Image: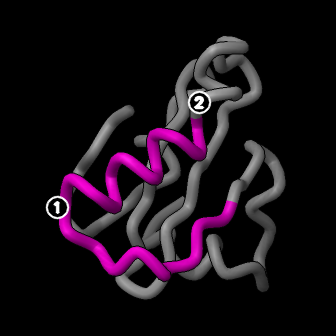
Amino acid sequence: MIVDRSGTLRKTQLDTNDTFVVDSGSQIFVWIGKQASAAERKGGLQYAQKYVADFHRPPYIPISRVLEGGESDGTSFSSVRQEK
């Protein structure tokens, strides 16, 4: 799990070999790269739940899974990205 609390997310920061937990403030996203290992793919939602607990986020905050390539414009996740 990779946590970046800088507030700005660039598409170039997302690595196809990894899984990322992205906190938009009102929603948590689990971004899963195409080349992420089976263990990372399987553990993505668990990473997000751990993030929610560790960073004292509300337990009712929505968690969504986003597969690499599925972050098209108009989706909630596309609004999180600041640069392409």
Q: Amino acid at mark 1?
A: Ser
Q: Height in image: 14 above or below 53?
A: above
Q: Residue at x 72, y 14 (%)?
A: 38
Q: Residue at x 67, y 32 (%)?
A: 33
Where residue 50 sits: x, y (%)? 36, 46
Q: Residue at x 59, y 46 (%)?
A: 45
Q: Nearer the viewer, residue 49 or 71?
A: 49
Judge whether residue 41 is colored magenta. no
Color theme of the render: one colour
Residue 6 is labelled as: 1
N-terminal of the pair, mark 1 or mark 2, is 1
Quadrant where the N terminus lies? top left
Circle count: 2
Q: CA distance from mark 1 to mark 2?
A: 24 Å
Where residue 20 sits: x, y (%)? 48, 42
For the residue carrying disc 1, how many other residues have a C-alpha within 10 Å: few (<14), some (14-19), or many (20+)? few
Which of the two marks, 1 or 2, is nearer to us in this view? 2
In the rendered image, which residue does mark 2 sit on? 43
Q: Height in image: 59 above or below 54?
A: below
Start and end of the magenta stretch?
A: 44-64
Q: Residue at x 29, y 67 (%)?
A: 8
